[in-house]
Structure formats: C-alpha cells, structure tokens
Image (spheres, rainbow, N blue to C red):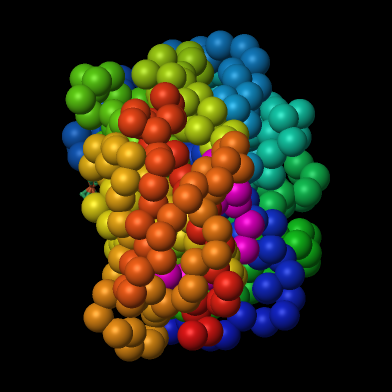
Amino acid sequence: MQDRIPASPLTPAQKRRLKWFRDARFGMFIHWGVYSQPARGEWMMHREGIPVAEYEGLVDTWQPGHDVARNWARLARRAGMKYMVFTTKHHDGFCLWDTDMTDYNAVRRGPKRDLVGEYVEACRAEGLRVGLYYSLRDWHHPDGSTCVTDEEGRRRFLDFTQGCVRELMSRYGKIDILWYDGPGPLSTPEAWESEKMNGMVRDLQPGILINNRSLLPEDFGTPEGHLQAAPEGRAWEACMTLNGSWCYAPTPPEDWLPVRQILRMLNTVAAGDGNLLLNIGPRADGSIPEIAVDRLEAVGEWLGKYGEALYGPADRVEKGLSWSNIGYWSLKGRTGYLWMLRGGWPGPTFGIGGLRVPGKRQPEGGLGAKVERVTFLDTGKEIEFDSEPGRIVLKGLPKRCPDPIAHGPVLKIEFGNNPKRQ
Ligand code: H79
C-alpha cells in the first residue's frame, strides 16, 4: 500500500528508531493460521462466502506441530534476514495469542497454545527483531462490517481492536514492529481512532516502528507485491510472496521465485534505501515447504559472501539504473556495488559505461566519478581495468562465473569522489 498521506520529513526520533531497520534491509513475513489447512488462500472465508459458524469448524481441527516457530526463525537467520513479522490475527479474526478480548483464540480453541508467545521467544532465541502483524479488518467480530454505519457497533469494535493491540504491546516484552493490515472497512484515521491507538502503542513500546496501514503515515510505507520506492527520505518496506500466495499453497515449482530473482529484489531495495519483507506460508503443521528452505538458504549463503552490498545505510540511485546488461548497482557514499545478476557471464573482458548520476546531467556515456579500484566483493581480489573516456574496461576476469550460488558475484567499485555529489 502506498502512502495515502504525503510524507512529512523524518523527525530526529524517527531517524533514530529507524536505524536498525535500515541496517537490516531484509525480513521474513509469516502468514500462518487456520486458513493454512485448506490452503486456498487467507482470503478464503471471504472469497468463498463461508459463514462464520462454518469457518469456526476449521479452528478446532487445527493442530500445529511443536517448536515450529524456532525453525522459521532459524531459517530466517540462515537466509540473512534480520527480523520477522508474524500474523497474530488475520482478517478471519482468529487470534493466535491468549487474549481476554475474545474466546476465539488459539489458547481456548484448536491448538490450545499461545502461538504468538512461542513466536516471540523463537525470534529472541535466534537474535531476530520481533514484528507483529495485526489485521484491523475482522470478518469474525460481530461489528467488524456493520461498524461502518452503526455508531454503537463502531465503538464496540474499536474497544475490541484497541484492547487486542494493547495486549500485544504489553504482554510479550519489547516489540520492534507493529505491522497493521487492513485498513478496511473504516476508511479514515479518525474513524479508526488511529492517533489515539498509536499513541497508546508508543507509550507501551517507546522504540517501536509502526507501518502506515492504520491510515497514518507513521514510520514506513508498505508497497505490497511490487518494489516501489517511497519518496526520498521516507522509509519503505516492500512485502512480497515467494510463490504468489501469502499463506501456504502447494503451487508447482515454476511458481516459486528463483534465487537470482530474490537477489535482484534485494538489489532493488538496496538501491532504493528500502527493505524487503519476504513471505513464507508454512503448512498448517508449521513446516516450511522444502523449496522455500532451499532457496532461502541459498540466498543466505550468497549474502554471506556479498552482504556488504545490502546491509547498512545506502544512497539512493535512480530506479533501474544500470551500468551494463549484466547487473544493476547500489551505492554507499564513494563505493558502488555492481550486482552481476542479469544476463550471462561476460567473459574475460567487459566495459562499464553510462553511469548517470541522479539529479545531474552527465556527458553522454560519462561515468559520474573517477574509478580508483575494482574488486570482487567476496574475496577482495583486485580486477585490472583501463580508464577510457566515458567508461572503464575490466580485464582478466575469469572465463567462467566465479559464483556457484547464483551465477552472479558483486563487484565493488571504489570512486575517488562521491558520485552523488558530482
Ligand atoms: O496479508 C496479506 C493479504 O491477505 C493482505 N495483505 C497482505 C500482507 C491484503 N489485504 N487486503 N489486500 C491484501 C488487498 C485485497 C486484495 C483483494 Fe483479493 C482482491 C481482495 C479480494 C480481491 C487478494 C486477491 C485476495 C483475494 C484475491
């Protein structure tokens, strides 16, 4: 979702609390609930027109396996992700924590466990930051739809919503992200009392980051399903699925993002000073499809070699800006990173030209800055090059691509001056 309200400049406090988030860049989204059993989408109740009483039957058959959250967290860490966001309640209204606000929860029904508590503990055990997803939209609450026209119903629904959020913010220790979803059916922050609700959240969790889906801009924008950078200065986090479905769906292998494509998405967020929240939908028992495990482990292995290009403060570069056919770049001050994840391996010699510098007209084909040094990011091995007008020509590259994981290494290109300030 793009920001509906124009972003205001970041406050110093906001910059401070966003620091870890911008350093982290990469997180794991988990969609898991009773809807993981039929595996026909987390919108199933709505899309298939299932009445509440019938859907409730699914709740009592849900028996997740044990220690599953720890496995997710372990995979997240191995994948190079630094935080997680977990569906504490999706639109179906089933609460995965021990709430006093409704009996429709995982401790009193079905699993008979506090799944949010287990998740939070797992994140901490693996050294990951903790994010909680909470859907404002609720198809189970009796006032969840009628609140639009029924004033008393809206009051009851808001009391319920604020009660749930208060519990999540006060029962599990430090929470790093509150990830609202919705925001239907109410359509303004006034109708949701978002300012009051988020004020309460910040009183309870002073360092927390809040996303923009309570219809206030808060700390970061949330493009869904596409990698659209927010305006300069504004933090953003794109959320993406691995196989076209948020919750578990047994889709054929062709539907799963290949490792190179995941890495290109990371390239895009690094180049746009944004984050990627990449989703996995565990099976109803909590296990993760093997294909997701394999691909994420490969991503983590690659980041183990080339992570410097992703993590940490970045300067924005123009969308899609490329030096060549074989990769796009990201930039940190005087260091450029060429993510060689497009096309085939160029062979022993190839030229890099046409670096245009954001906001500045450059001579046709001219590099924005003088190149001093080119190395492979993982080994530090230097690459010889000739400087020519408007380009450099790399020489003596290996005949075959030196990266077996994604068939694409990262080149580190050090400039004598800051290309952005040219
Ligand atoms: O939790 C995931 C989605 O279920 C949720 N946000 C992400 C993170 C979401 N809520 N609203 N939307 C997404 C946009 C709604 C899209 C819809 Fe549809 C189009 C609803 C019905 C038609 C998506 C596509 C759901 C069913 C088909």
**Residue in the foreground of this view, choosing between 15 and 325:** 325
Image coords of residue 272 (percent x, y) = 44, 65
Q: Which residue is drawn at 53% across and 84% down?
A: 421
Q: Residue at x 63, y 57 (%)?
A: 312
Q: Quadrant of the N terminus?
A: bottom left
Q: In this view, does 158 lie to the left or right of 46?
A: right
Image coords of residue 169 (percent x, y) = 71, 52
Q: Which residue is drawn at 30% across and 85% down?
A: 363
Q: In this view, does 19 lie above or below 167?
A: below
**Residue in the foreground of this view, choosing between 303 and 89:** 303
Q: In this view, does 118 lie to the left or right of 301?
A: right
Image coords of residue 243 (percent x, y) = 29, 32
Q: How many badges with numbers are in the image?
A: 0
**Residue in the foreground of this view, choosing between 327 and 295:** 327
Which quadrant holds residue 417?
bottom right
Q: In this view, does 417 lie above or below 296?
A: below
Q: Any magenta on residue 61?
A: no
Image coords of residue 234 (percent x, y) = 51, 74
Q: Residue at x 63, y 73 (%)?
A: 196
**Residue in the foreground of this view, choosing between 359 and 288:** 359
Dominant SS type (magenta): loop
Q: Any magenta on residue 315?
A: yes
Which quadrant holds residue 106?
top right
Q: Is residue 258 above or below residue 198?
A: above
User: Does residue 286 appear anywhere in the picture?
Assistant: yes
Q: Is residue 25 above or below residue 318?
A: above
Q: Give the range drawn in magenta.
A: 306-319
